[in-house]
Structure formats: C-alpha cells, structure tokens
Image (cartoon, grey):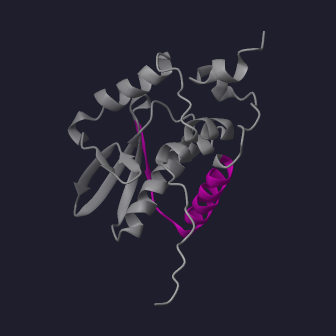
Amino acid sequence: MADVKAAPYEMPVTGVHIWYYFICKREVWLIVHQIAADQDDENVDLGRFFNDQTYQRDKKELSFGHIKIDRVREERGELVIGEVKKSSRFKESARYQLLYYLDTLRQMGITARGELLFPKERRKEIVEWTPEAKTKLDKAIADIRKIARFPVPPPPKKIPFCQKCAYREYCWAEEG
C-alpha cells in the first residue's frame, strides 16, 4: 500500500470571522481564541433583536458546516440568501460575509444570489459572486488563518467601530 499523506489541517473559517476581518483584525483573533465579548453589551442585544424581529416573512435560517445564513428564499426559480445587518456602516464587511456564504454554496454546486438587508434603513443591496470577489475572499481567509496562529492578539488600533464594540473594555481598559 502506498503512503498517503494527510492534507495539513486548515482552521475552519466562519462568516463571523470574515465580517470582523474587514473591521478589526484583533477582534478576529479574540473570536478565534474563544475570548467572549461582553454579552450584556446593548449592541450585541440590538443585533440579536434585528435578526430575530425583522423580515419575518423570509424568516428561514439555514445552518450547516461553518455557516449560518439569516434568510433563505426562492424567487422565480433562483435561490436567494440574505444577511441582516442593523446598518450599512460596515457594508464591505457585510458584503464579504455574504460572498463567503455564496462561495461556500457554490463549492457545493449551488448557485445563489445574495441580498444584504438593512431594516433600520429600509434598504437592500444585491450581492453576486464574481471571480474578483473570490480572489479577495481567498486572501482574507488565508489572513484569518495566519492571524489565528499568532500567539497573542494584534495590538489594538483605535477605529470608529471601537465605540460600539463589545470588546472595547478588553482592548481599552487601561486607557483613561
């Protein structure tokens, strides 16, 4: 029998990792290392509320593998998946999270189109998989795996997201 070499282990990446990668690399490290954010933070509660209480007609969650899609529906024979966000402020993060889901489905032989849903703004944006987006997504996935192997988190960087981040006390506790 010939020697068969096992493929090297690759850490599973999730949509949440993708979302935070485009906002804060430190938060990616914290999440990967299962350091819990402040679960009593009002922004965490607001996010849960928007996900639970909006778009009830399309309320069909789908979880499998390492992804959890907020909304799934069929429209004129086409699969449409939706990601609900409380605002479009971090649209690039939301876009790549949804592209990650589209890419995962595509790898399974399922073609779909995506919709970013912003209920507070009463807006939606169509997101479609493209080879260019796939290239950027693959780079993000490789970077997330690299960040995960760091022995300590990247140093904190003050960004606008910090004001409403559930990790803000962890990152900035010693700051006046």
Q: How many marks?
A: 0
Instruction: Give the residue displayed 72% in from the left and 38% down from the top.
Output: 152
What segment carries the magenta color?
123-147
**Compared with residue 133, is residue 86 higher up or lower down, i.e. above or below?**
above
Instruction: Give the residue displayed 40% in from the left and 43% down from the top.
Output: 83
Residue 156 location (% of width, % of height): 74, 30
Identify the image quadrant of the C terminus. top right
Instruction: Give the residue displayed 38% in from the left and 31% down from the top.
Output: 119
Residue 16 location (% of width, % of height): 50, 42
> Horizontally, is 112 left or right of 176 in the view?
left
Residue at the farthest front position = 1
Q: Is residue 141 magenta?
A: yes
Q: Is residue 146 magenta?
A: yes
Residue 145 location (% of width, % of height): 62, 54
> Which residue is nearer to you in this view: 106 or 26?
26
Residue 159 position by quadrant: top right
> Which residue is nearer to you in this view: 24 or 11?
11
Instruction: Give the residue displayed 46% in from the left and 23% down from the top.
Output: 44
> Horizontally, is 33 left or right of 52 in the view?
right
> Horizontally, is 52 left or right of 172 in the view?
left
> Horizontally, is 108 left or right of 170 in the view?
left
